[in-house]
Amino acid sequence: MKGSYIEEVKERAQELAEAVHTKSGGNAILLPVTKGFGVGEVQAMLEVGLTKVGESYAQEMLEKAEIITDDRLAWHMIGRIQRNKVRKLSETVDLWHSVDREELITEISKHKSDSKILIQVDMNDRYEQGGCSPENVPNLIEFASDIGVKVEGLMTIGVDQDIEATRNIFSELAKLSKRMGLKEISMGMSNDFEIAIDYGATILRVGRSIFGERAKK
Ligand SMILES: *Cc1c(COP(=O)(O)O)cnc(C)c1O
């Protein structure tokens, strides 16, 4: 049906994915964030060839994953992780973005020893969205590697409404990632993904720019 919401969403996602590819020189991918939206939106992403999607809430991810069982789909957990949810999530999650402490790494490895993770870093210690301090990153990498968990990269969140602070954070995270010899840099959301590309992001977590505003919880 032309002009329908789902058609628009598919078009926007496709255009954005192409723009990201071009602007990053093939370095970055678009990760559609479907939290707050339904399985129709996830299905739509598959139909335009975007096989990785991000979710923030354990229960919501599990409910959707139960309905859409397409093997091509890879679920990324981008929200704060509670240790007691790890067991249930471990069969579904392909990449954990927001790992910020040893006990989580231990728990994740218990259920799947070669799990892939990103370490979430709080670059300026200013807000309550999780993340370890930059100083703690080497320890966590070593801790994970010792037990076989694969640290693929780092993840961070910019500062809402503050472009200068966000630039600083993205730039510092990219440097840290490089120093650590890591491949993935997950940063940038609807408000700041263009800045993130400039600083070398490899995974852009974008929800509203594709799907529109989420209903308030
Ligand atoms: C919700 C969320 C996003 C996507 O945010 P939008 O503003 O919808 O693009 C990205 N990253 C994290 C960690 C989120 O919680």
Image (cartoon, grey):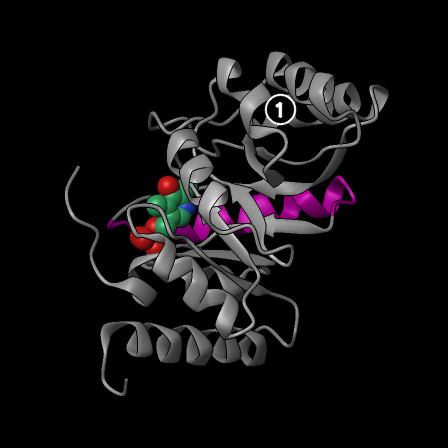
Identified at 57% across, 44% down, the residue is: 173
Q: Residues within 10 Å of mark 1 (few under 14, many from 20)?
A: few
Q: Is residue 158 visible?
A: no
Q: Label 1's element?
A: helix
Q: Residue 192 in the image: x percent, y percent?
A: 37, 58
Identified at 64% across, 77% down, the residue is: 25
Q: Which quadrant is home to the N terminus?
A: bottom left
Q: Residue 39 in the image: x percent, y percent?
A: 38, 54
* Helix, strand or loop for the magenta stretch, by majority: helix
Instruction: Please state which of residues 105 and 100 is positioned toward the viewer in this rendering.
Output: 105
User: Hey, which residue is sitting farthest left in the picture?
Assistant: 216
For mark 1, what is the residue? 135
Q: Is residue 106 above or below residue 61?
A: above
Q: Residue 175 in the image: x percent, y percent?
A: 64, 47
Q: Is residue 173 magenta?
A: yes
Q: Which residues are magenta?
A: 161-182
